Amino acid sequence: MPRSFLRQLLPAPLLSIVLFFVWLLLNGTVEPAHLLLAALLAVAIPLWTARLVPERMRPLAWGPVLRLLVIVPWDVVTSTFVVARQVLGPENRLNSCFIRVPVSIRNPHGLFMLATIVSLTPGTLMADISRDRKHLLVHALHLEDESALIELIQQRYERPLQQIFDGNDGQEPEETAR
C-alpha cells in the first residue's frame, strides 16, 4: 500500500492502536467478532473525528515530555499534603481567589494540556482559557503571592508545553524598542 493511502486510512495511527486495544480490554475477549469490531472502530473513529482536530501535532520533543511526566505527579502529590494541611486548619486563614495568568503558548493542544495540568494540581480548583487565548483563569484555594503562582505556572508547566507543542523554548520573541 502506498504511504499516502495508509495515512488517509489511519490519520492518527496511535489513536487507532489505543482504540483497538481499549475495545478488547473493555470487552475482555479476543473473539474474532470483537477483533473485527475493534479494527473497524480503530479505523472509523479517527476518520470521523479527524476534522475536529484544529491542527496537526508536530513530532514530540521527548525531553520536555519526560520532564512533565516527573514534575506533574510530584506536584500533585506534594500539593495534596499542603492542601490537606490548609483545609484541616482554620478556614478563615484560607485566601481563596481567582487570578489571570498570562500565557504565550498558542497551540490549542498545549493550551488544553496547560489548563488540565493546572486544574488537576491540588490547590487550584479550576482553570479556564480566556476567549482570546491569552490568559488562563485559575481559582486558587489559598493564595499568598499572586506573582509567585503566575511564575510557577509559566515556568513549571507552560514553558515545557511550549517546547512540546510550539517548538520553541517558551520565550516570547523580544519586542523591538521604538
Image (spheres, helix red, strand yellow):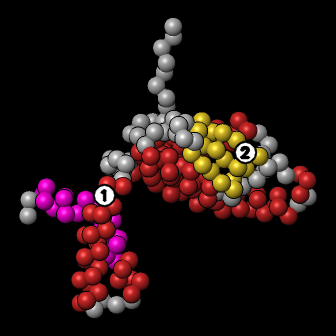
Q: Main secondary structure of the magenta part?
A: helix
Residue stretch rendered in magenta on the structure: 3-21
Q: Nearer the viewer, residue 27 or 71?
A: 27
Q: Is residue 127 left or right of residue 105?
A: right
Rendered position, 100 above or below 61 = above
Q: CA distance from mark 2 to mark 1?
A: 35 Å
Residue at 41% over, 36% down: 168
- Which structural element holds mark 2? strand
**Residue at mark 1:** 50
- Res 166 → quadrant: top left
User: Residue 3 in the image: x percent, y percent?
Assistant: 12, 57
Residue 95 in the magenta stretch? The answer is no
User: Residue 101 in the image: x percent, y percent?
Assistant: 63, 39
- Res 25 → quadrant: bottom left
Please state, as top left, top right, bottom left or bottom right, where the N terminus lies in the image: bottom left
Residue at 72% over, 45% down: 98
User: Residue 27 in the image: x percent, y percent?
Assistant: 39, 87
Label located before the other in sequence (2 or 1)? 1
